[in-house]
Amino acid sequence: MPEALEGGENSACTPSCPLEAEDAELTPEGLALLDQDPEDQEGSAERRRRRQLDGLIVERLRTEGFVGKNYEKIVDRLTGYGYHTMIKWAASGEIFRKARQVGRPVPADKITLMWTAEDRHGVSVDSVLGGLKVFRTYGLIEGRWTPQGGANLDTYFLGAVIRAFPRVYIRWFDSHQRGQAELDHPTGEGVSDPFAVPDQRATDPVHAAVTHDYVDRLLPLVKNPQVREALGWRALGYTQRQAADRVGLTEKALERRISRVRDQLTKQVRPYELGEGGAR
């Protein structure tokens, strides 16, 4: 198994969130979309040849019980391919569109484009491990992958990884939200930075976590220093009017400026929510 996947704790998807059979239900339509790689210059005849070769490989592995050196060699190749593809797609946000293509969309309110490289690594590793589990069980052992199915082995494996991704990602996102809320609401005394924790007016931790995530999404798009400061006050639990007063704006003026930033955020996230081609 590639070094990047070794020693992982599968922390984003623990045994309490097992992957199920539905994660491996790759529809012909979904596989066709995955197989339409704009960078892939192979013709249909070459793709058929690859599927036939993959079929011979799978039959050989079946006679060996899907264990041993040959199986491990195939697993190394597939997981390496899956990991590097996932890292690229996670960084660009393409993975959210791919998940929607195969019928497993991530809810729009959980999509973030500002997760760290470490976060993307963890989710990518766990998605590959989850995809490998369903690929081996359903694709190989139960024989759901066939050369006549329209997808080569690489594409089928990647489809399993993509279908594992939403469950892994959502679990990471929810855990990250809880962890961030705890960091933003320490119980100790002696906090020196007044912007480090919400004001006592923000008594609802769930509301505070949502507000912090909302502000985290908006801040990178905000250039106006007054609006940035106002968002900081909002994150501390102040009302829109109180935040506006503190930065020298009227409540309506602040709302208009925040609305423009919100529109920018919507345009940024919308392609990953709907996929290419807009609303369906």
Image (spheres, rainbow, N blue to C red):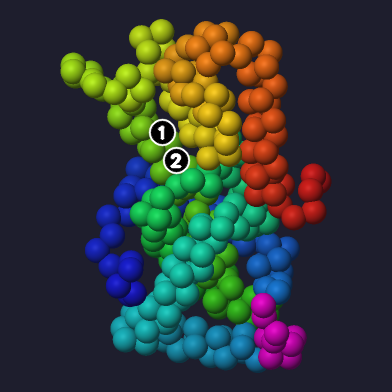
Measuring from the top left, give residue 100's x and y in whole percent: 65, 52
Q: Nearer the viewer, residue 67 or 225?
A: 225
Disc 2: CA contacts within 10 A as few (<14), some (14-19) or many (>=20): some
Quarter that holds the N terminus: bottom left
Name the amino acid type tagged 2: Phe
The region drawn magenta spans 39-48
In the rendered view, tell whether residue 242 sits above or below residue 120.
above
Q: Which residue is mark 1?
A: 177
Residue 274's place in the image compared with 153, above or below, is: above
> Is residue 165 toward the left or the right of residue 69 in the image?
right
Residue 225 vs residue 279, the one in the foreground: 225
Q: Residue at x 70, y 42 (%)?
A: 267
Note whether 223 is above or below 7 in the view shown. Answer: above
Residue shown at 63% from the left, 18% from the top: 254
User: Label 2, on which residue?
Assistant: 173
Magenta-span inclusion, residue 207: no
Q: Is residue 138 visible?
A: no
- Measuring 42% from the left and 18% from the top, which residue is drawn there? 236
Q: Residues within 10 Å of mark 1 (few under 14, many from 20)?
A: some
Residues at discs 1 and 2 in contact (Cβ within 8 Å): yes
Task: Residue 273: give x, y in percent of width and height.
Answer: 67, 45
Q: Secondary structure at mark 2?
A: helix
Judge by depth and name the residue closer to the eye, 117 or 21.
117
